[in-house]
């Protein structure tokens, strides 16, 4: 019976990591109602790398695809990229990104993550931001892990309509609608 439970737990672990690759061992342990050590042993047995390694591999793969800007110019870690369609980036808010008095993240970091991701998904040698419509929904604080997801909604000529939604672990914190304009290198 214990073997069956283990197989089911490991299958659930695989599904959770595929669906949400940013989950920590602690979060996985809580979801599957087992110890952190059990999660680590299961990951080892299944060949699932730890969180840092999963993110690093995803980031390396995604950065090689970027055309419109340099991969290292994306603010945050570029995790997933499908040129001409969508992308995902991760940004951890650190002490130097917040206002000293309120401990709330400066807006330009949240904007920069979204804007650079929107540029990165454009399948063109060069692109710029034409229009940006932004909404900061809730304050962001030190330690927050921001996951931005960008998607090209439509394209008209050299204009790309890109929506970016940024979430922390629990809710949407920022939303942007961009019109990105691609240019020939000439």
Image (tube, rainbow, N blue to C red):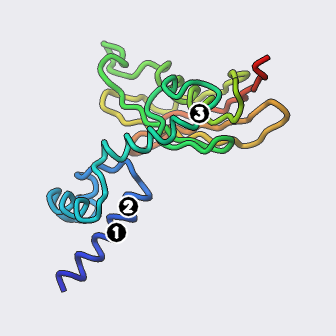
| CA–CA distance in space, label 2 to label 1 | 6 Å
- 60 or 25, nearer to the observer: 60
Residue that numbered label 3 is attached to: 66
Specify which label sits upstream in the sequence, 1 or 3: 1
Residue drawn at x 24%, y 52% as measured from the top left:
25
| Circle 1 residues within 10 Å: few <14, some 14–19, many ≥20 | some
Name the outermost residue toward the right: 157
Which quadrant holds residue 175? top right
- Residue 171, how many percent across, how many down? 44, 43
Residue drawn at x 56%, y 42% as measured from the top left:
81
Residue drawn at x 31%, y 46% as measured from the top left:
51
The N terminus sits in image quarter: bottom left
Tell me if label 2 and label 1 are in contact, CB under 8 Å: yes
- Residue 27, how many percent across, how many down? 27, 53
Q: Given this view, does label 1 or label 3 mark the residue nearer the observer?
A: 3
Residue drawn at x 28%, y 57% as measured from the top left:
28
Residue that numbered label 1 is attached to: 12
- Residue 87, how many percent across, how many down? 56, 41
Residue that numbered label 2 is attached to: 16
Q: In the shown orientation, is residue 110 left or right of residue 145? A: right
| CA–CA distance in space, label 1 to label 3 | 33 Å
């Amino acid at each position: 019976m214990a073997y069956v439970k283990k197989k089911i737990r490991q299958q659930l672990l695989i599904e959770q990591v595929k669906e949400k690759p940013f989950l920590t061992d602690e979060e996985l342990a809580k979801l599957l109602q087992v110890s952190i050590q059990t999660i680590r042993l299961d990951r080892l047995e299944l060949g699932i790398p730890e969180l840092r390694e999963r993110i690093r591999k995803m980031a390396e793969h995604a950065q090689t695809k970027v055309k419109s800007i340099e991969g290292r110019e994306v603010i945050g870690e570029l995790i997933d990229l499908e040129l001409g369609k969508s992308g995902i980036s991760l940004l951890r808010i650190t002490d130097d990104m917040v206002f000293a008095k309120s401990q709330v993240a400066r807006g330009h970091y949240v904007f920069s993550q979204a804007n650079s991701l929107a540029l990165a998904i454009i399948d063109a040698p060069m692109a710029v931001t034409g229009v940006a419509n932004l909404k900061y929904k809730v304050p962001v604080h030190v330690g927050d892990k921001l996951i931005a997801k960008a998607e090209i909604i439509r394209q008209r000529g050299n204009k790309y309509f890109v929506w970016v939604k940024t979430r922390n672990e629990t809710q949407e914190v920022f939303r942007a609608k961009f019109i990105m304009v691609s240019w020939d290198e000439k």
